Image (spheres, rainbow, N blue to C red):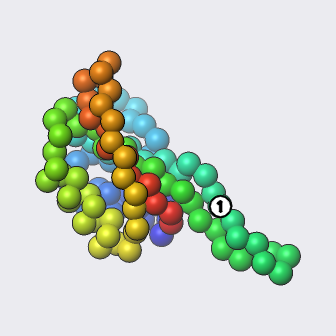
């Protein structure tokens, strides 16, 4: 899956989604995703496999388990095996849900 294909997948969730950041302020809920690193597997003096480590950040004003489930189902339906983390940003008064996976 490419970053462009991932954008199409995330856009289908029904909330704003962008790579890295929005140029203008957006009201929550919204998604931001970024390529954290590129991993390679080398074999026989060549690159055998390339994977991008992706982080999705979901920003919401309230804890929205239904939206989280929609995101999780969307990732799974597209063959993505994800990990999860959550925090609350006191300064912004927002929940931030993180999803990590490789493409």
Towards the viewer: 55 or 27 = 55
Towards the viewer: 51 or 86 = 86
Q: Which residue is depicted at the point 42% across and 37% down?
A: 21
Query: Is residue 18 in view from this perspective?
Result: no
Would you name the residue on which mark 1 appears? 39
User: x%, y% of residue 24?
Assistant: 35, 29
User: x%, y% of residue 41?
Assistant: 70, 70
User: x%, y% of residue 101?
Assistant: 46, 60
Q: In the image, is residue 72 above or below residue 84?
A: below
User: x%, y% of residue 80?
Assistant: 40, 68
Q: Residue furthest top?
A: 91
Q: Which residue is depicted at the point 26% across and 58% down?
A: 71
Left or right: residue 44 versus residue 31 is right
Left or right: residue 8 versus residue 46 is left
Query: Is residue 41 in view from this perspective?
Result: yes
Q: Which residue is depicted at the point 16% across and 50% down?
A: 65
Numbered label tally = 1
Label 1: element kind: strand
Q: Which residue is depicted at the point 56% across and 48% down?
A: 36
Left or right: residue 44 versus residue 86 is right
Q: Residue furthest bottom?
A: 44
């Amino acid at each position: 899956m490419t970053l462009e294909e991932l954008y199409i997948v995330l856009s289908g969730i029904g909330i704003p989604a962008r790579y890295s950041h929005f140029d203008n302020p957006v009201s929550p809920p919204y998604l931001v995703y970024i390529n954290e690193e590129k991993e390679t597997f080398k074999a026989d003096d060549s690159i055998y496999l390339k994977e991008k480590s992706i982080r999705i950040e979901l920003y919401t004003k309230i804890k929205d388990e239904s939206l989280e489930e929609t995101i999780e189902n969307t990732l799974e339906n597209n063959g993505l095996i994800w990990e999860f983390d959550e925090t609350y940003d006191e300064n912004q008064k927002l929940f931030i849900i993180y999803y990590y996976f490789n493409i």
